[in-house]
Amino acid sequence: MHAEKLLINGHFYTMDTSTPRAPALVSAGDQIVALGDATELREQFPTAEVLDLGGRAVLPGLTDAHIHFLGYALGLQKIDLYEVPSLQEALDRVAARAAEVPPGTWIQGHGWTQEVWPKHAFPSAADLDRVATHHPVILSHKSWHSCWVNSQALAVAGITADTPDPKGGAIQRDADGAPTGILLEMSAMDLIENHVPIPSASEIDVALTAAFPTAWRLGLTGIHDCDGRDALHAYQRLHQRDALGIRVHKHIRAQALDEAITVGLRSGLGDAQLRLGHVKLFADGALGSRTAWMLAPYEGRPNDRGIPIYPPEELADMVYRAAQAGLACAIHAIGDRANRVVLDAFERVQGAPLPLPQRIEHVQLLHPDDLPRLAQMGVVASMQPIHAPQDMEIAERYWGTRAALSYAWHALLNSGAVLAFGSDCPVETMNPFVGIHAAVTRRRADGAPGPDGWYPEQRLTVAQAVYAYTMGAAHAAGLTHRLGSLSPGKLADLVVLDRDIFKVAPDEISETRPLGTMIGGRWVYRDAALS
């Protein structure tokens, strides 16, 4: 058991309405045992190890409620194409990697988006063929809802003009029907991904272990992980060795639904370190690839309403079967039609005795008629605030005036819905303080689009944003009795900050740097400034 620790001279923002603020805290073992006056706590716990925080702000440990952590960890080995400013810059980076690795080796990269390029046009296999003729290449889009490949990758996968579009996806084609090198949505991307060598279990464990310290240095003590089977296996291996460095609420993919039902798995199985979460389903695609499913067409594209992943009745059937088995669902929905279809599916299973609340991932665009329905049904809005300032130009380009109810955090909160915030990393940075800044300002770090932010009526207070990363995330995971606030009896997860985000100018929030991160009463990261 970890020794008693007494943290004094701090500004503890507890997220507990019964004791919103406190100057000192005591942990014993892995739990918080007391908050209050430092002098009184010294007398009550005379053998506790004392640490003076120097007046610094302290928050409950932060949870990223939507992350692809294994994808992030493995992505550290890929070509970094995050929002490269031009097609040529992307090609230069691919050419550099091709010169470094043997012919025939797969070249992988992530993060490009044509939306930041001058003409907003998708690239092609022919572009990649100019710089990589002896390597199959697959480069995932920033959104992870499309990929860009070269001709050799198409050949390895056997994709030709005669290859039909897979269900829930599309192979982009030229005027003659030949594949262009862009594959839209997971089912189409899998046509290529299934041929990419899979990392070994030991390689995955090493990648995850190397990534945990990055999360700790950002103040993250927990994640809700959206990756697949390999991630679940790895988290179990690490947990068994007492080497799982972060609390994991692990979703399972739709492909595993039948097996989960057959063996009797239920949401919430496990402990506070590793817990079976929701069944992760997809209703539609993404905004950037124009595969988000819309009630009305995209602006300037009268025949384009996006791509549904499942017909409504099939999605509703999956939700029903999951609910009957005690499995809650977390459903990706971007477009307003996708969100409506998901809400309709959840409405059909209202009253089912689920151990966790149903949730919608992203909730990026709602029709006004659907906004109150999340609160009415107790559906969690699992959202990623960084998406709003990052996507504002393309949201206005493709959604027009409908964008007024996109990323509608304040409206949802006012309706009574619970918000749980995350990053969607590696789509965006996992830094929660960048997310809090976005939620509070609706601006980018460079100040765009202006002092009031984008649709400023949807801004949140700092307290509301922090709550979504703490108690909101705990609610979504069914763990409010263990996590989410600095309260006696809860697990001792906390983060010490280099500045008080409740007092600094909003523009400074994104620059916040944690000085110490504690998980279960143990410092997993502690800067020299906390001596």
Image: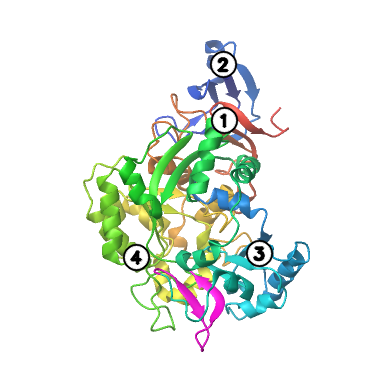
| Residue drawn at point x = 47 percent, y = 62 percent | 456
Mark nearest the camera among 4 and 2 is: 4
Give the vertical position of 259 relative to 289 (above or below).
Answer: above
In contact (CB < 8 Å): disc 4 and disc 1: no
- What amino acid is found at the position of numbered circle 1 in the picture? Arg
Q: Earlier in the sequence, mark 4 or mark 1?
A: 1
Q: How many angstroms separate mark 4 from mark 1 (CA)?
A: 39 Å
Tell me the CA gap for discs 1 and 2: 39 Å
From mark 3 to mark 4, how far is it between C-alphas? 30 Å
Q: Are marks 4 and 2 in contact (CB under 8 Å)?
A: no
Q: Is residue 421 magenta?
A: no
Q: CA distance from mark 4 to mark 2?
A: 61 Å
- Say which of marks 3 and 4 sits in front: 4
* Amino acid type assigned to the residue bearing label 4 in the image: Tyr
Q: Is residue 175 one of those drawn in magenta?
A: yes
**Percent coordinates x, y for residue 36 in the rendering:** 50, 22
Number of the label disc, if any, that sits on residue 81: 3
- Between 310 and 34, the residue placed more toward the observer is 310
**Which of pointers 3 and 2 lies earlier in the amino acid sequence?**
2
Q: Amino acid at mark 2?
A: Thr
Label 4 sits on a secondary structure element that is loop
Considering the numbered disc 3 on the image, is that residue within a helix, a strand or a loop?
A: loop
Identify residue for label 1.
Answer: 241
Q: Name which quarter of the figure residue 524 lies in.
A: top right
Pick the quarter of the image with the C terminus. Answer: top right
Judging by the rendered image, the residue that carries numbered circle 4 is: 310
Asked whether residue 297 is in view, the answer is yes
Judged from the image, the secondary structure of the residue bearing numbered disc 2 is helix
Q: Look at the picture and state if 233 lies above or below 125.
A: above
The residue segment tinted magenta is 167-184
Q: Amino acid at mark 3?
A: Leu
Circle 1 packing at 10 Å, graded few (<14), some (14-19), many (20+), is few
